[in-house]
Each structure stands twice: as structure tokens, then as C-alpha cells.
Image: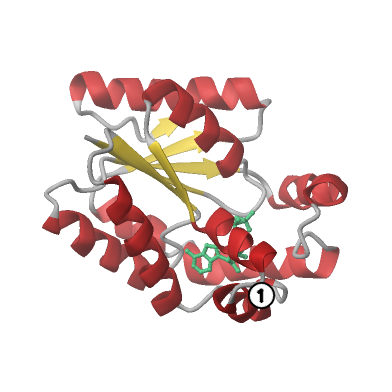
Amino acid sequence: MLNIVIFGPPGSGKGTQSAKIVEKYGLVHLSTGDLLREEMARNSPLGIEVRKFIDKGLLVPDEIIMRELYEKASEYLDAQGMIFDGFPRTIIQAEMLDRMLVKREIPVSIVLSVEVEEEELFNRMMGRAQDSGRSDDQAHIIRHRIEVYKNQTLPLMDYYKKQGKIAVINGMSPVEIVFERITRAIDTYLSTEVILPEIN
Ligand code: ADP
């Protein structure tokens, strides 16, 4: 069982890299952002509720996230492992995830922290805005999402560092190169159970 958390600021390429990881390692992809966007597209009661937060660049409340994720994760009890993308985003979510996984005796194996400089993040998200059609890919909301990340999500680095699970991946390179770094981190973990702390 391989449970990966992919962690990084908005625009760091988590979604793109997750898709490649899923293909190579046969994991189930759990993206809270994708789940929430599906609900918004369907205009479900949940979608209407979460839009209020997402369109402002705010985090969706922890209770909503946990309920949705728990439900989704329980569909995949037989999976070879999961990749959590865009989740956890707060310390509370990380603690809840640990409790959920401990019950099933499958803790988080490795946390990939994809690091990209702030201006590059901004430029990437502005660049994709046209294609993504995402209501939160607008200059002032992007800036806000980056701030929310720094304030609410970055503290998770310490949480996972204390658990010795962080592999820092240099994300300032083309997709394929970043993916090579990620596979190096995962393959090292799989063959030796050692987590390389920093991969360039
Ligand atoms: P990005 O990381 O590029 O901003 P995501 O698709 O992961 O994209 O998330 C988009 C938005 O969905 C976030 O800005 C936030 O409002 C909401 N969201 C996603 N995951 C979570 C989460 N785990 N907790 C709270 N809000 C979330």
C-alpha cells in the first residue's frame, strides 16, 4: 500500500504530476479540488455552498472537506494506494487524515512537496486561465490563494517534517523533469523505505 500526499502551492503542478503518478504506480487519485469543481459544475447543493468560498480564493471549511473525502476514500478500500492532491490543506485536515488512515492501518507513506517560486506560480495560473475556465484563476484571486496557502497550508510542512515524511521536489522545471524527480523519490522509498529529503 502506497499512500502519497502531493503538497504544494496553487499552480505548482500537483494535478499534472498526480495524473502521471497514477498512471505509473496504479494509485487512486483523490483531488479535493476536482471533487469540488464537479459539484460546482452540477450545481448541486454542495456545489452552490462551496462556490462561495472557492470563488473568493478561500479554503472550503474542514468539515465539508472531510465528509466528502471520507465518502470518496471509502469507495477505494481495495486500491493499491492513493494519492491525495490538494488535501490536506490545514493541520486539522492532516490530523483527520492520519486518524482515518490509522484505522485502516495504512499511514501516509511519503509527502511530496513541490516547490515553485511565487512569480512563476502567478504566471502559470494567469497563463492557464483561458483554458482552465476556472473562476478562481483571476489575478486578484490567484494572489489571495497564494496568501491563503502561505498562512494556512504551509504550516503542514512542519507537521510532516516531524513525521520524517517530506521529500522536497524542485518544481521549477518542465513537467517531465519534475516527474523524474518525483519518481526518484517514490522509487527510493519503495526499494529502501528511505525518504530523500531534497531532490533537484
Ligand atoms: P489549486 O491548488 O490550484 O488552487 P485545487 O483544485 O486544489 O487548486 O483547489 C481549488 C480550490 O478548492 C481551493 O482554492 C479551495 O477553495 C478549494 N479546496 C480544494 N481542496 C481543499 C481542501 N482540502 N480544503 C479546503 N479547501 C479546498
190 relative to 18, above or below: above
136 relative position to 171: left or right = right
Residue 42: image location, x then y, percent: 65, 65
User: Image check: 149 left or right of 21?
Assistant: right
Residue labelled with disc 1: 51
- Amino acid type shown at disc 1: Arg
Q: Position of residue 77 (x, y in %)?
A: 23, 46
Relative to 45, is 161 above or below? Answer: above
Q: Quadrant of ligand 1?
A: bottom right
Q: Quadrant of residue 196?
A: top left
Which residue is rendered at x = 67% and y = 81% of the image? 52
Is residue 74 positioned above or below 192 on the image?
A: below
Looking at the picture, how far across and down is residue 27, in whole percent?
37, 33
What is the total number of numbered labels drawn onto the structure image? Answer: 1
* Residue 185 position by quadrant: top left
**Residue shown at the point (27%, 67%) measured from the top left:** 95
Q: Position of residue 92 (x, y in %)?
A: 34, 73
* Label 1 environment density (alpha carbons within 10 Å; few <14, some 14–19, many ≥20): many
Pick the residue in front: 80 or 198. 80
Tell which of 153 and 137 is nearer to you.
137
Residue 47 location, quadrant: bottom right
